Amino acid sequence: MAAIATPHTRTSNYLNADYSWRSWLLTLDHKRIGILYIVSITFFFFLGGLFATLVRLELLTPPADLFAGTTYNKLFSMHGIIMVFFFLVPSIPATLGNFLLPLMIGARDLAFPRLNLASWYVLMLGGVFMILAMIGGGVDTGWTFYTPFSTTFSNTNVFYAALAIFIAGFSSIFTGINFIVTVHKMRAPGMTWFRLPLFVWSMYATSLIMVLGTPVLAITLVLVALERILGIGIFDPSIGGDAVLFQHLFWFYSHPAVYIMVLPGMAVVSEVIAAFARRPIFGYKFVAFSSLAIAIIGFLVWGHHMFVSSQSMYASLVFSLLSYLVAIPSAIKVFNWTATLYKGSIRWQTPMLYAMGFLGLFVIGGLTGLFLAALPVDVHVHDTYFVVAHFHYIMVGGTIMAYLGGIHYWWPKISGRMYSEWLGKLSAVVIFLGFNLTFFPQFIAGYMGMPRRYAAYVPEFQVLNVLSTAGASILAVGYLMPLVYLLWSLRYGPLAPPNPWEATGLEWETSSPPPPHNFAKTPVVTRGPYAYTPEDVHTFVPQGELRG
């Protein structure tokens, strides 16, 4: 069993081991690299959020009176590109995944520490090119870069934006390879596959998508660059290309990429629900295998993005059925989380509120996804705000609620400090209410026919847009709150004990913050990851003291 630090004492840990800037920028410690990612993606999150705020301000009134149409196109494009590729995709895997995965399997570090550091530098290099594209006038293609507009007609910085995403993609590939090898090769003695925490199972499934899917996006962007610069006819029909080919290649990556964002969120929710309901996850193996099923089926449904793109009726029918199929493993997770909560001794602390927020938003997003998988309904609401609301509920609402829930759950382990529980609960409620007020009216607007990507709209949609903009204002306050009180806690928060939530994972059996090498001795795993029992409701029993 690992040595357990005495609460309220501070020995050498990964934060105070060395304070120099070189020790951070050249670190090979997975925990410090996780911190570098947290700082970086927080910057990109608020940068992308700034563009979203400007978009919502423009849509407060029907005419395009705040920005010209071309400027509006750049605003929502920059918002989408930054949020998807520089926040949502790396969010949980690069931050919490980096910090926690070795701790959860009892390892000293990831399999390739230098590759891990390189993945952060690669993401930063991509971010630099993205900012250069933004400073140079932005890009107006949307985050989807649809051709032939992106290759032939747009006169904005498409090349630099595509180059930024191409470079950032290697960060995902490096991280995915590192996670897969680490899980296979560096598990502690006794850590069998079915003693892995569900967080690790989800990271493993997510890594498979990152390694297999990201190269397709990279190749697609190279082809866009070749056509744009050299005029080679690949996607533009006027020079012998095929515009639908781009959509096939783009969505072959970008639909599984949704699960790069959602699967890690599900991983966080599994850990939080088990810890705060004081119960083992119901149907552990079903939840674990459903992660792999989502990863596999996710590669088979890209065609549902092209129901109105001249795709054959029979192909659309197959993709429609496959899209319904992916709902099954997702539903298994939701049902099993609900069964875990049933008769649980639930503690309504901040991480649990965020987990419940994830459940609410994910269920709404998932159910409306079934509408879009249905051919006739998809034709009716295609390219309307119904689609915008749907993917924001899944990709943004679900992922961010889970990310913030995970940050609050593991914050004592990361920082060694506790935060204001009252402010934490308040922020979770504010974000949940603000999010629903922002995006639920967009379901109605989309169903009534309001198209997406337009700076101006007919006056009958103004009430719904005013509600959305008001909700976005509340949401912005909610997102700023954790930033403020978590930073405050770094200096003034009470010292955290090793296991403030009385959870059963290996990461809680080392000090808070952990020492540079994670564990004084390699832990020996003797039981499953969620050995909560009725007798354990109020008394935490460390793993080594339980009978296997």
Image (cartoon, rainbow, N blue to C red):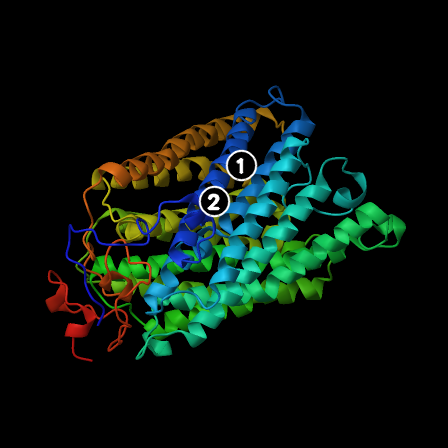
In the image, residue 368 sits, relative to residue 50, either above or below, namely: below
Q: x%, y% of residue 116? A: 49, 59
Looking at the picture, which amino acid does disc 2 mark?
A: Ile
Work out whether residue 392 can be spotted. yes
Q: Which mark is residue 41?
A: 2
Q: Residue furthest right?
A: 239
Quarter holding the N terminus? Answer: bottom left
- Residue pictured at 43% horizontal, 65% vertical: 110
Residue with the mark numbered 1? 445
Work out whether residue 341 can be spotted. no
Q: Nearer the viewer, mark 2 or mark 1?
A: 2
- Residue pictured at 60% horizontal, 57% vertical: 170
- Residue pictured at 73% horizontal, 54% vertical: 222
In the image, residue 67 sits, relative to residue 235, either above or below, namely: above
Provide the secondary structure element on which disc 1 rests: helix
Q: x%, y% of residue 458? A: 61, 26
Q: Tag 1 or tag 2, which sits nearer the N-term?
A: 2
Q: How far separated are the C-alphas under marks 2 and 1? A: 31 Å
Provide the secondary structure element on which disc 2 rests: helix
